[in-house]
Image: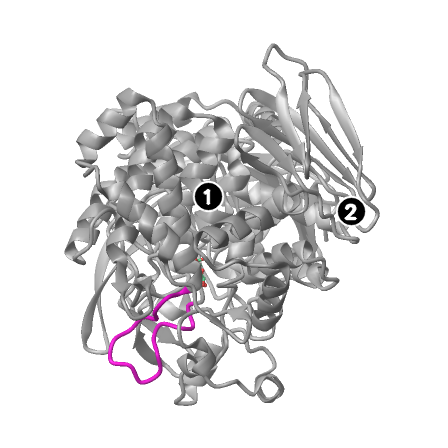
Amino acid sequence: MTRAWTWSYEGYDADTERLRESLCALGNGYFVTRGAASEVLFGPAHYPGTYAAGCYNRLTSTVDGQTVENEDMVNLPNWLPLRYRICPADTAPGPWLSPDHAFLTEHRQTLDLRHGTLTRWSCYEDEAGRRLSVEQCRLVHMGDPHLAALRTCFTAHGWSGAVEVESGIDGAVRNAGIARYHGLADQHLTGWDTGDERPDIVWLSCRTLDSDIRIALAARTRASAGRGGMPHPQLSALQAFHSLVLPVTADVPSVVEKTVTLYTSRDPAIDSPLHAAVDGVVLAPHFRQLRASHRRAWENLWRQAKLEVPGEAGGILRLHLFHLLQTLSPHTAELDVGVPARGLHGEAYRGHVFWDELFVLPFLNLHLPQVSRALLDYRYRRLPAACHAAREAGRAGAMYPWQSAGDGREETQQLHLNPRSGRWLPDHSRLQHHVGSAIAYNVWQYGQASGDTEFLHTRGAEMLVQIARFWASAADWDAALGRYRIRGVVGPDEYHDGYPDAAAPGVDDNAYTNVTAAWVLLRALDLCRTLPEAHQRQLSERLQLDPEEPERWDDIAHRLHVPYHQGVISQFAGYEKLAELDWDGYRQRYGDIRRLDRILEAEGDTVNRYQASKQADVLMLGYLFSPAELASVFRLLGCPLDDDTWRATVDYYLHRTTHGSTLSALVHAWVLARVHRPDAWTYCEEALTGDVADVQGGTTAEGIHLGAMAGTLDFVQRGMTGLETRDEALWLDPAPLRELSKFGVRFRYRRHWDIDLRIRPEQVRIAVPASENPPVRVKLRDRSFALAPGTSLRLDLPEER
Ligand code: BGC
């Protein structure tokens, strides 16, 4: 259930508990802990994962007789454990209690988005009729990224006695969160050590097996003043716990506070993670103070990312923003990390970094540009690895990996399991070289939105040029066609990783790949032409730019092949020759056909034979580019794109897409909003409910879909407002949906903080706060305005909008 600032669940449901754990996870950009019960270490319903950004480890496994290597985001020791049982004065202690126990009579939990806390409330009643209610509030500190805390308040209703509590850190964890990966090696930690510092502090340290990252956690457990309950350390090889007996008096709350610190050897300004963790927990204030400073940090953050959307949609969007900010916070700006596709909320996709940042950075650019820049620096530091990969593939420039993690090498799995057939299959998704264009797009967008020329003219330019070089070397001249072609790739639609019966994987002339490649080449040219002389010289020297290279880029950018058939853009060359699927038949037989690839493979067929896409592919072009910009790229390519062709293309793929990725509904909503189709809202709703209703059938329990979450925020911010930052101006072209026609966003544009943009069905209003900054240039369709700080502009929208 959602209210404006809270997200609540009534009752306990073992079947959906793992989903709740993902949606109620708490974090601060440095680490995230799933919203798991503190009472259970592990179980079918419980997976208490904790993940630190950028903390990966590589393991080797054998599947189907083949040795495969996978690098995973490591599940760190669990700091949540806190279990309890009733100790009556006269008899032996009762059983350890948990939401799974039959003594549970009531349960509810609430995620407070404004203040970043999760409160779980449970009530138990034993056979003797003793009722115990337990209210537990937790936080992962947004101000101090190494701190977390758990305050548990026990109330004995009408009886007195004691509650025995065990609280500690569990190092006996594995990466066991994903059923599909169960055949693979999962023990990433080794070298455990445990100890105590004072009676109330215990610690646990360990390290990752291959990447050799040292990790330390310390926990302080204290009973509320004056209520007795001295903690006794209990140490074993893999666990550091406290046990304490807490006297309880009828109807008087008794509190246990647990405060935890987490450090790794990747942290700056520490001598050792263990010293830092112990010192940190010694100095940590009480829960009340911690909560106050945590709230202040969140208030500050919410001020920088304001989105006002009424109703149910607004509540979901706020939850999306909350999880985005927990994954990528201002602390991220201090780290060497990328955008993990599934947040830091679970182990799906191993915490890897895909092209999903394409759906994340455009939103962050206008709120936390320093975070966008850090995320781009993650890519910049891995530019040498991308150049190495290109060389190995016989190409020039930079070939960024489809899946990236620690050092920037290709981390895409060699084999993936089809759970329907039980077969391990070769994974060719690494041929999605379009990830490079996503990085270039983000470099460009970040530069436009932030005005950060220091970045754009140096590291940004280097990445852009190296990606352009890669495309130039990947494009072959086809004399018969009179066009350049890029062959052997996979587009965003992962269903098509080759032609049916072809010996080699990959498809040719993927329209999305080619059009974005042309766009990258054009931007690289623009940048090289406009760079200040000193930067131009530096860039030429660093990259040994041949003066003739730009000419070749220009030629390719104008003559890359974009295939068409039946008056629509073809997803790739030969798409039209593929068979039509019996859509109704498959829907009738299977109901949910989102993962049609798995269904067909289990039937001994292959989705490569059909005109059926997993997700938006050609239509991604309408997501990245405004209609005007898209038309201009196509014009330069010598294949004009008129409204009718685009509409026909949208229709064509709309009927041939299964939406097996959460990104797909989002892109369709975005594109349909522009072609003014009444069904845009259907896709918007699907995108909004993707995670909260777990639309992809169980995948959210394995981690949130960060790209789709951030994309829905950007759908409001840019999709429906038509907001673009280009040519030193803010461009607006509102296209609000009937169902979402009244909303406001506040964003930062260069030195202007808090620009306020409000959309009403018939009106748009933009206000620039007072400052010493120069006016903002605003373009609304064909009109242009200079908006001085301290002024606002109100314009009527034409009626058909
Ligand atoms: C999608 C990709 C996406 C990945 C990670 C896949 O299911 O097909 O486009 O990058 O998930 O989110």
Mark 2 crowdedness (10 Å alpha carbons): few <14, some 14-19, many ≥20: many
Q: Which residue is pictured at 68% across the width and 21% down the height?
A: 787
- In the image, which disc is placed on residue 741? 2
Closer-to-camera residue (61/603): 603
Q: Which residue is pictured at 31% across the width and 77% down the height?
A: 424
Task: Specify whether 473 is left or right of 373.
Answer: left
Please name the amino acid that badge 1 sits on. Answer: Val
- In the image, which disc is placed on residue 32? 1
Task: Specify whether 208 is left or right of 344.
Answer: left
- Where ligand 1 lies, by image quadrant? bottom left
Tell me residue 337's x, y (percent). 36, 40
Residue 498 on the magenta span: yes
Decide: is 503 above or below 585: above
Please tell me in which quadrant of the rendered image residue 605 appears.
bottom left
Callout 1: helix, strand or loop?
strand
Which range of residues does the magenta coloring cover?
Answer: 494-510
Q: Label 2 vs label 1: CA separation?
A: 34 Å
Colour convention of the picture: one colour
Q: Which residue is pictured at 63% across the width and 64% down the height?
A: 644
Q: If you read the primary sequence from the N terminus, does the residue marked by circle 2 or circle 1 appear first?
A: 1
Instruction: Find out if the beta carbon at label 2 lies less than 8 Å from the nearest ligand 1 atom.
Output: no
Closer-to-camera residue (704/176): 704
Residue 125 makes an appearance in the image: no
